[in-house]
């Protein structure tokens, strides 16, 4: 994919910024009215998409509350009109693969625009992210192989339920009307390779110590497939809105198509209003 153009999901080529700039809200620290206002401010300012997290408890994101991912995205779909919507990343162990596929297609139907589905393989038993799962009595998958297998299964089910050639018995199962890109969040080479082989994109933390290795693994596994999107994430900062800033230039050099800026604590619609990405 070129760095100064991208393929529109509706078909054809369109001139775009070298790096598309998105925002991500933290529902552990922002209540619904403020999340709504942030999304509207981001839409007005010209951000590409608004993303949310997928967690069961606010403590996982250093907050005191939480909103379920697809419920929140459905609400955002109803109050916005243009900005794309996304979840980064959806824990594939929090829902059955079919439920996840139906939920994503439902957001697409409400929004009538692109829903971006970021998927993650889930937490190891030793990570702090697994604490919320144990708290609610949800099993934590012990091995990397089993967690990756669940991710592959989920991608396959999403493809089967959303695909144009699905069997007749799936005719009334919700299917998105817009292309629904599946993006894998990768923190290691195996997941980056899996993303390149099976997904429509990869997301790697910009400040990850092995970032370049992970991006290379995804792009190598992608081969010559077109339409594969490279995205990264980091905490919002003013310089990241400027395409001439050193970090934005470095992203272009790394082949990044999209950057997701996570809004820090205390950063809401008032701080975002009028700050337009370029």
Image (cartoon, rainbow, N blue to C red):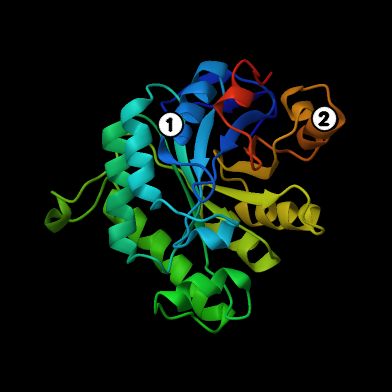
Quadrant location of residue 3?
top right
Disc 2: which residue: 249
Is 68 placed left or right of 216 in the picture?
left
Quadrant location of residue 211?
bottom right
Few, some or many residues within 10 Å of mark 2 (<14, 14–19, 20+): some
* SS of the residue under disc 2: helix
Is 237 placed left or right of 34 in the picture?
right
Q: Which circle, 1 or 2, is nearer the viewer? A: 1
**Residue 182 on image: x %, y %:** 47, 49
**Of the numbered discs in the image, which one, if any, rests on residue 129?**
none
70 over 128 or under it: above or below: above
Disc 1: which residue: 36
The mark tally for this picture is 2
**Residue 162 on image: x %, y %:** 30, 49
Quadrant location of residue 248?
top right
What residue sits 32% from the left and 66% below the top? 96
Q: What distance separates the C-alpha of mark 1 from that of mark 2?
A: 31 Å
What residue sits 44% from the left and 54% below the top? 66
* SS of the residue under disc 1: helix
What residue sits 77% from the left and 55% below the top? 208
Residue at far bottom of view? 142
């Amino acid at each position: 994919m070129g760095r100064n153009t991208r393929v529109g999901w509706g078909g054809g080529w369109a001139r775009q910024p070298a790096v598309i700039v998105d925002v991500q809200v933290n529902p552990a620290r922002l209540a619904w009215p403020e999340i709504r206002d942030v999304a509207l401010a981001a839409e007005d300012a010209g951000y590409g998409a608004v993303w949310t997290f997928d967690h069961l408890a606010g403590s996982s994101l250093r907050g005191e509350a939480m909103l379920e991912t697809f419920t929140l995205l459905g609400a955002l779909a109803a109050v916005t009109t243009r900005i794309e919507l996304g979840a980064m990343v959806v824990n594939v162990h929090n829902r059955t693969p079919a439920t996840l596929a139906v939920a994503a297609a439902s957001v697409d139907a409400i929004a009538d625009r692109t829903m971006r589905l970021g998927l993650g393989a889930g937490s190891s038993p030793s990570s702090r992210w697994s604490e919320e799962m144990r708290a609610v009595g949800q099993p934590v998958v012990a091995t990397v192989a089993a967690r990756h297998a669940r991710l592959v299964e989920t991608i396959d089910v999403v493809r089967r339920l959303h695909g144009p050639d699905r069997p007749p018995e799936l005719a009334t199962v919700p299917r998105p009307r817009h292309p629904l890109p599946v993006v894998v969040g990768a923190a290691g080479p195996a997941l980056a390779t899996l993303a390149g082989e099976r997904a429509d994109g990869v997301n790697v933390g910009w400040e990850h110590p092995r970032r370049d290795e992970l991006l290379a693994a995804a792009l190598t596994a992608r081969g010559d497939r077109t339409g594969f999107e490279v995205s990264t994430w980091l905490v919002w900062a003013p310089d990241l809105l400027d395409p001439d800033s050193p970090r934005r230039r470095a992203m272009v050099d790394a082949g990044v198509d999209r950057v997701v800026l996570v809004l820090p604590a205390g950063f809401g619609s008032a701080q975002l209003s009028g700050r337009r990405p370029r």
